[in-house]
Amino acid sequence: MREKILIIGTSHTGAFYTARDAIAAGFPDLDVSYFGLPGRVYSSAVYEGGVFRAPEGMPRQLAWMDRREIDFAPFSHILHVGERYALNHVMRLMVFHDVLEEPERTGRAFISSAALTDMMRGTVARRTERLLERFGKDSRACFLPAPYPLARSTRPGAGHEYALAALGKRAHGAKWMALYEQIIEEEMHKAGLDVLLQPPQTRAGQFMTADRFARAGTDQSAPPDQVDHRHMNADYGWQVFCAFAQRCLGQTPESGFAVPEQQQKTG
């Protein structure tokens, strides 16, 4: 019997769903199910008695979703996708302050490294506590943060990520990003929750995802309402699932298997 895996979360589950054929072919011993909801709907959903259920009268579903609830009982491993750990707030803390112990001076308000660290830790701890309150301690669960925005999002235009672009100009950005991720791992560990950070092979520097993981037709040449720097394509879903499978399941894809090139840009 194949091992049953659940991937559940916000709209970022779409990258995994679009990679479902590749995942099924690369991991034939796994039976993977997918359950995703738009972010606000996901936040309002209820988890009771082992069943995750969307709120009544939810305004919309993702196009590929065909159900409102799912029972966690049959699954041996559950990958939760999409927690942001207050990323935007943390980036703004880094951008809008000069850290006393860092040499760079920009005329911004000062903050000590101890205060900045405590603020980041408190913010992450609150998000971690919410996960624990919502899902409890479940040895089957692993939490994957939402992907960082695409590197192209730092360019002016639709979907511009101002804080990310500004942070890229700060000399200490990479150092404090590493500390932020360390805090996530420490706070999750203290809560008894497992976390899988975004794999390095999908990144393009601090707080950014490589542009090759963009979905087709979502760059700044598209109509403004179709520009999307935050949702990734099937190749991203494949790469991250492989990292999850290796770390949490002790499995690697069948030799030589990868997402077909024509599928990599879908999403």
Image: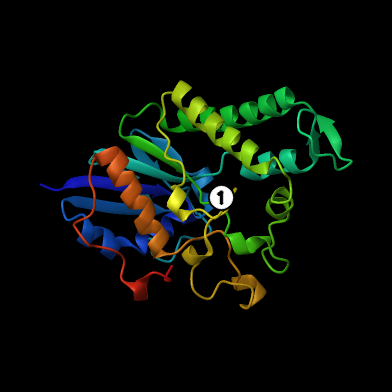
Residue drawn at point x = 21 percent, y = 52 percent: 31
Q: Quadrant of residue 264?
A: bottom left
Residue named by callout 1 = 40
Q: Look at the image and tell me whether residue 67 can be seen.
A: no
Looking at the picture, the colour scheme in use is rainbow
- Residue 9 is situated, as x and y percent measured from the top left of the image, at 44, 48
- Relative side of 79 to 189, left or right: left
Q: Secondary structure at mark 1?
A: helix
Between 54 and 25, the residue placed more toward the observer is: 25
Q: Residue at x 60, y 48 (%)?
A: 206
Q: Residue furthest left?
A: 1
Mark count = 1
- From the viewer's perspective, is residue 69 above or below residue 120? below
Q: Which residue is at a point 36% across and 60% down the rendered structure image?
A: 17
Height in image: 16 above or below 264?
above
Q: Can residue 160 be seen by looking at this rendering? A: yes
For the residue carrying disc 1, how many other residues have a C-alpha within 10 Å: few (<14), some (14-19), or many (20+)? few
Residue 50: quadrant of the picture? top left
Q: Quadrant of the C terminus?
A: bottom left
230 up-or-down from 8: above or below:
below
Query: Which residue of the protein is positioned furthest toward the front in this rendering?
Result: 103
Q: Nearer the viewer, residue 129 or 74?
A: 129
* Amino acid, disc 1: Arg
Which quadrant would residue 260 be assigned to in this image? bottom left
Q: Position of residue 209 (x, y in %)?
A: 53, 56
Write the residue at 31% across / 66% down: 259
The picture places residue 135, in percent across and down from the top left corner, at 42, 32
